[in-house]
Amino acid sequence: MDRAQKEKVVEELGQIFESSGVVVVAHYEGMTVSEMQDLRAKMRDAGGSVRVAKNKLAKIALEGQPCASIAEYLTGMTVLASSEDPVAAAKVVQDYSKENEKLVILGGSMGENALDPAGVKAVAAMPSREELIASIVGCIGAPASNIAGAIGAPASNIASILSTIEEKAA
């Protein structure tokens, strides 16, 4: 790799560190190409990406970034998983590491906060953006359905009272 290519990689990694909601660093030693492709596909489906880069270049890209403290995790065969959604990458890597013990989570970052493996696991346990939106919409919609039920209830009560009166009169 010549100098221009290295500078391009450093720039790309810098953009990943800057724009991602979460970055997870993991060892992937012993994983086959098909296992890595499977991980990439799962990450792509979740809206994230998986990147293998030289640790030295990643450390250069981390300089001056809010998440620079994750540079300590960049040793050995490391892979960087990232996503804009602050939960997606952590969730995919956590789930994949359960089915494939060759993928070992070292840590990561969420904005300015450095995460250890337990922190990544805690982030993975959080609901995703879509799940949060669905629960908020459910909370907003619930009072409306309650109001509609309350408005409709007196009419049905009146109808049942009238039918009872009619039955007694007959």
Image (spheres, rainbow, N blue to C red):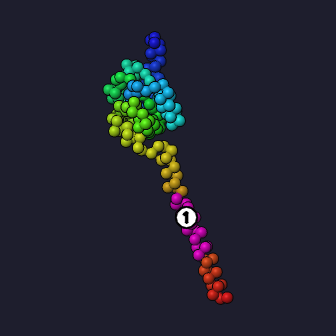
* Quadrant assignment, res 98: top left
Image location (x, y in percent) of residue 141? 54, 56
Compared with residue 84, is residue 51 higher up or lower down, i.e. above or below? above
What is the span of residues highlighted in magenta in the rendered image?
Answer: 142-157
Overall secondary structure of the magenta section: helix
Q: Residue furthest top?
A: 2
Image location (x, y in percent) of residue 1? 45, 12
Does residue 148 show up magenta in the picture? yes
Image location (x, y in percent) of residue 66? 37, 30
**What secondary structure is found at the residue carrying circle 1?**
helix
**Badge 1: few (under 14), some or many (20 or more) residues near its Cα, within 10 Å?**
few
Q: Is residue 66 visible?
A: no
Q: Quadrant of the C terminus?
A: bottom right
* Quadrant assignment, res 62: top left
Q: Is residue 110 visible?
A: yes
Q: How many marks?
A: 1
Does residue 3 show up magenta in the picture? no
Q: Residue furthest right?
A: 170
Using the image as rendered, state which of residue 22 and residue 63 is in the foreground: 22
Q: What is the three-letter code of the residue carrying label 1? A: Ile
Residue drawn at 55 percent across, 60 percent down: 144
Residue drawn at 55 percent across, 68 percent down: 150
* Quadrant assignment, res 101: top left
Using the image as rendered, state which of residue 6 and residue 120 is in the foreground: 120
Image location (x, y in percent) of residue 44? 52, 33
Residue drawn at 43 percent across, 22 percent down: 53
Q: Which residue is mark 1?
A: 147
Compared with residue 152, is residue 36 higher up or lower down, i.e. above or below? above
